Image (cartoon, rainbow, N blue to C red):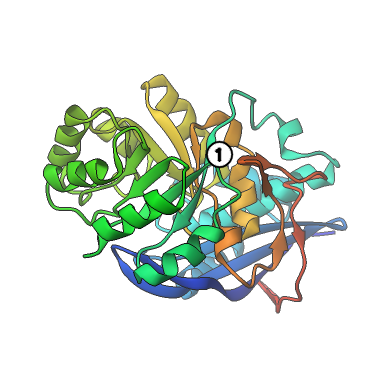
């Protein structure tokens, strides 16, 4: 049977309005991919926050253009993607969705998990995060209840009430805090103040405090504090990692920005060689995208894959969290199960 590929437009909806330095939003547009061959099905996801250049339409258009000239079998298409880095180079989320689906299908075809494909190796148990977005202070107790399964709390910064929010969270919850400014701070002192408001002994990391075009500020902050500083928007690719490694203590590796699980592995391996900490992040993907990344959890220091707990209409079931630890599903592929009826549109039909 020849390879069949379909897509589904979908909007993931947050349980609570989600605030970051980029603004407040109620959901995230996504594209799910389904690949079918010889009775096996693989799934992939492109989730697209509004601050990305990719859109639902651009993802679909890029996939249609590629698949129209691609091999008609899954193994051939996966090899083509991995051997030709120029393919979908302008659409990392589109590539990530297709690559994930093909890896899922490949392992299901031999009735194995992705671990048995030797994609991942056990190294450590990471700290897990769940996020409290910025917003009205009265909502903080409710948001904190949604994070109780994780080992630490991630707090979004960049709002005028940062100090009051951090004080309230510190008083209501005993766990360590991880601070994420999403490029929203202006000076090194701004970042140091927020650490001081919490207490350095409670802060286990800070993520991308300054704009990505200010490597000088990130380098100065790294030198001024013992708190690990993780690069996110500053490090999108392997080339960025090489250029920015001396400005940060660690890197936030995200499937949507790097473009595929093969590239996730490359970034993790190179970050380790450079002596950097590794954080696995997401763009509020569903259980599909987050579970695919979670297979690399034991190669990381910090896991921030809380999308399944932030959204209320997750169409997939996958990873869970127990006592602050990621628990991966059993079964072939990524172990993710589709639990909702989705409207699929064939590509090339």
Q: Nearer the viewer, residue 299 or 39?
A: 299
**Left or right, 23 with reference to 328:** left
Residue at the spot 55% in from the left edge and 63% down from the top edge: 310
Residue 296 in picture, x, y percent from top left: 59, 36
Residue 3 appears anywhere in the view:
no
Residue at the spot 46% in from the left edge and 43% down from the top edge: 174
Residue 201 appears anywhere in the view:
yes
**Left or right, 329 with reference to 21:** right
The residue singled out by tag 1 in the image is 262
Residue 16 in picture, x, y percent from top left: 49, 72
Q: Nearer the viewer, residue 296 or 71?
A: 296
Residue 283 in picture, x, y percent from top left: 47, 58
As helix, strand or loop, the secondary structure at mark 1 comes to helix
**In which quadrant will I find the C terminus?**
bottom right
Q: Quadrant of residue 53?
A: bottom left
Q: Quadrant of residue 116?
A: top right
Residue at the spot 54% in from the left edge and 50% down from the top edge: 305
**In which quadrant will I find the N terminus?**
bottom right
**Left or right, 237 with reference to 122:** left
């Amino acid at each position: 049977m020849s390879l069949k590929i379909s897509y589904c437009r979908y909007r993931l909806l947050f349980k609570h309005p989600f605030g970051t330095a980029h603004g407040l939003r109620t959901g995230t547009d996504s594209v799910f991919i389904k690949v079918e061959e010889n009775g096996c099905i693989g799934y992939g996801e492109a989730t697209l926050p509004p601050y990305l250049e990719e859109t639902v339409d651009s993802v679909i258009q890029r996939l249609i253009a590629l698949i129209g000239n691609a091999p008609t079998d899954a193994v051939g298409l996966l090899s083509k993607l991995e051997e030709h880095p120029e393919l979908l180079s302008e659409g990392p989320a589109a590539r990530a969705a297709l690559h994930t689906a093909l890896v899922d299908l490949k392992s299901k075809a031999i009735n194995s998990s992705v671990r048995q494909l030797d994609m991942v190796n056990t190294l450590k148990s990471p700290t897990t995060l769940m996020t409290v977005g910025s917003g009205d202070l009265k909502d903080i107790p409710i948001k904190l209840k949604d994070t109780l399964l994780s080992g630490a709390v991630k707090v979004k910064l960049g709002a005028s009430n940062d100090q009051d929010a951090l004080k309230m969270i510190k008083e209501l919850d005993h766990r360590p805090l991880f601070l994420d400014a999403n490029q929203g701070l202006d000076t090194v002192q701004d970042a140091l103040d927020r650490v001081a408001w919490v207490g350095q002994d409670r802060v286990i990391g800070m993520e991308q405090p300054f704009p990505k075009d200010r490597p000088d500020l990130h380098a100065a902050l790294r030198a001024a504090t013992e708190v690990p500083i993780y690069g996110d928007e500053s490090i999108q690719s392997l080339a960025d990692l090489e250029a920015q490694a001396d400005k940060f203590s660690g890197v936030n590796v995200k499937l949507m920005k790097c473009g595929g699980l093969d590239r996730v592995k490359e970034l993790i391996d190179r970050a380790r060689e450079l002596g950097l900490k590794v954080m696995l992040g997401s763009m509020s993907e569903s259980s599909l995208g987050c579970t695919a990344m979670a297979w690399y959890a034991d190669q990381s220091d910090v896991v921030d894959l809380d999308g399944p707990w932030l959204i209320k209409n997750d169409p997939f079931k996958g990873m869970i969290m127990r006592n602050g630890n990621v628990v991966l599903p059993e079964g072939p592929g990524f172990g993710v199960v589709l639990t909702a009826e989705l409207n699929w549109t064939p590509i090339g039909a």
